Image (tube, helix red, strand yellow):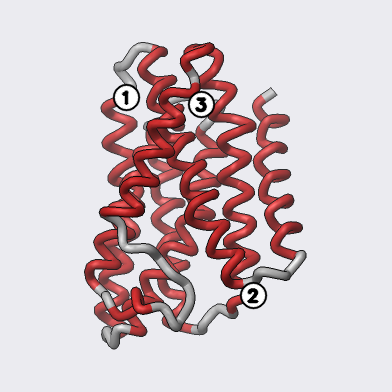
């Protein structure tokens, strides 16, 4: 619980910072693309360098099923439930306001569940925390940008940012308390599903946005590689 008391405020803080940045100064499209590329690299690294090996040690040949389930969960919900967090100002999503806020908040709650599952195994905690934190900043920036474009007052946006910052810690707390008493097999399934959600977010959500914003900028590949390297270095700390 001590670790949880450190990690969850950190997630909440970075979410608040990301949400307030658009209220102070608009981030350029190029800078946003680099941030998203780095975020995708960290998420993919968390999946392939940390979560997948931990899951496979317990589930062996059954490893693919929970990962596929997590991937399809996000994929289906992105199509039918979530309101996509588009970073382009020409996007009509920016006129939706509250539905966008609710959709991205639900997404954030699932991120928290992934974090809570990862925190059950101490060796996964830091890298999953890093993946969630870096992913939270673009999400919270998106919410502020959407609400600003929809004509919301900055004071109301600040309150909604605060509510949004609570969603991931809430999901993590629920998952951590619920999964702790499970057998190793069920914990491995939970981590596998979380890995699948990370994989879907990186490949079906973040990377397509990077391609749309900065299609021909080679620096996006550099920042993707840096994100992967940061996750890989976490394996050295584990050993």
Q: What percent of the width, then of the height, locates residue 131?
A: 53, 46
Give the mark, 2 or 1, whose residue is nearer the N terminus.
2
Please give the name of the residue rendered at 43% of the width and 38% of the height, measured from the top-left corner: 71
Q: What's the CA distance linking mark 3 and mark 2?
A: 36 Å
Say the numbered circle drawn on residue 3. Answer: none
Asked if the residue at tag 2 contacts the one at tag 3, i.e. Cβ–Cβ closer than 8 Å, the answer is: no
Residue at the spot of label 3: 122
Marker disc for residue 30: 2
Q: Are marks 3 and 1 in contact (CB under 8 Å)?
A: no
Above or below residue 229? Residue 177 is: above
Q: Name the quadrant containing residue 163.
A: bottom left
| Precedes in sequence: disc 3 or disc 1 | 3
Which residue does the numbered mark 1 point to in the structure image?
Answer: 179
Q: Nearer the viewer, residue 167 or 74?
A: 74
Rendered location of residue 177, percent (x, y): 28, 29
In which quadrant will I find the C terminus?
A: top right
Nearer to us in this view, 72 or 35: 72
User: What residue is rendered at 39% in x and 20% in y?
Assistant: 187
Determine whether 198 is above or below 148 in the image: above
């Amino acid at each position: 619980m001590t670790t949880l008391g450190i990690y969850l405020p950190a997630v909440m803080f970075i979410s608040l910072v990301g949400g307030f940045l658009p209220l102070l100064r608009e981030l350029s499209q190029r800078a946003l693309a680099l941030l998203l590329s780095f975020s995708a690299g960290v998420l993919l690294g968390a999946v392939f360098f940390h979560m997948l090996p931990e899951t496979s040690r317990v589930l062996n040949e059954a490893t693919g099923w929970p990962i596929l389930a997590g991937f399809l969960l996000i994929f289906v919900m992105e199509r039918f439930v979530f309101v996509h967090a588009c970073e382009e100002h020409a996007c009509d999503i920016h006129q939706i306001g509250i539905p966008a806020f609710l959709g991205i908040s639900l997404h954030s709650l699932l991120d928290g569940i992934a974090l809570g599952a990862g925190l059950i195994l101490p060796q996964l905690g830091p890298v999953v925390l890093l993946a969630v934190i870096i992913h939270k900043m673009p999400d919270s920036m998106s919410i502020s940008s959407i609400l600003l474009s929809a004509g919301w007052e900055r004071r109301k946006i600040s309150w909604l940012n605060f509510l949004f910052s609570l969603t991931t810690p809430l999901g993590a707390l629920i998952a951590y308390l619920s999964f702790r008493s499970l057998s190793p097999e069920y914990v491995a399934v939970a981590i596998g599903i979380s890995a699948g959600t990370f994989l879907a977010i990186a490949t079906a959500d973040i990377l397509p946005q990077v391609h749309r914003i900065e299609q021909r900028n080679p620096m996006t590949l550099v920042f993707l590689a840096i994100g992967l390297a940061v996750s890989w270095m976490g394996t050295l700390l584990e050993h």
